[in-house]
Image (cartoon, helix red, strand yellow):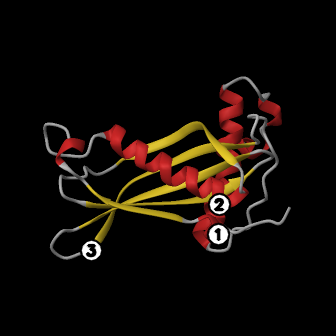
Amino acid sequence: MQAKTPEQSKTILTDMVLPGETNPLNNLFGGELLARMDRAASIAARRHCRHIVVTASVNHVAFSKAVPLGSVVTVEAKVSRAFKTSMEVFIDVWIEDRVSGERSKANEGIYTFVAVDDTGKPVLVPEVLPETDLEKQRFDAALRRKQLSLLLSGKMKPHDATELKAFFE
């Protein structure tokens, strides 16, 4: 199985915020944005492994900026790291100013997907080979996030969380 770069999984979804997708303040509902992020991330994960993928967890979402009615929203997703059968996908959400066309980062999220076969059994996925500085940072941080998640769920003993030890030494 050949390793792939994050760029090979890159998925970009662009859409406009419509009236039926907004709250009483005329901003995009958070759930609507989460669904868009999940779709982009699942496409990125599938591009990486070429198998059926299922959302295992939403590890982090930051709603930093409201997304107003009529905004053009771009969701960009890339696989940041792959483990045995799972993949972490980092998602950046951008909004475009209606007048100037300038893009600004509105939100971000980190989702985990598991690759499965037709019967739902997990399958192995290719490794990730990060290229850019940002991809390398996200790749390194993914292992810390995974170990923290396993530690908090009781699936890993504290002394086995090698990537987290540096925080406490």
Taking depth in this image into account, of 162 and 88 the one nearest to the observer is 88
The tag earlier along the polypeptide, 3 or 1, is 1
Q: Position of residue 64 (x, y in %)?
A: 33, 49
Please give the residue where the numbered disc 3 appears in the rendered image. 102
Counting from the top left corner in percent of width and height, residue 85 is at 77, 44
Most foreground residue, 168 or 102? 102
Name the residue at 35% across, 38% down: 31
Q: Earlier in the sequence, mark 2 or mark 3?
A: 2
Graded by Cα atoms within 10 Å as few (under 14), some (14 to 19) or many (20 or more), the crowding at tag 2 reads many
Q: Disc 2 vs disc 3: which is toward the camera? A: 2
- Residue 59 sits in quarter: top right
The answer to which of marks 2 and 1 sits earlier in the sequence is 1
- Foreground mark, 2 or 1, reads 2
Residue 82 visible in the picture:
yes
The residue drawn where x is 74% and y is 67% is 4
Distance (Cα) linking label 3 and label 1: 26 Å
> Label 2 vs label 1: CA separation?
7 Å
Tell me, yes or no, whether the two marked residues, 2 and 1, touch with CB atoms within 8 Å. Answer: yes
Q: Is residue 8 left or right of residue 90?
A: right
Q: Residue furthest bottom?
A: 100
**Of helix, strand and loop, which one carries label 1?**
helix
Q: Which mark is residue 8?
A: 1
Q: Which residue is mark 2?
A: 47
Q: Nearer the viewer, residue 68 or 11?
A: 11
Question: Which quadrant would residue 80 be assigned to in this image?
Answer: bottom right
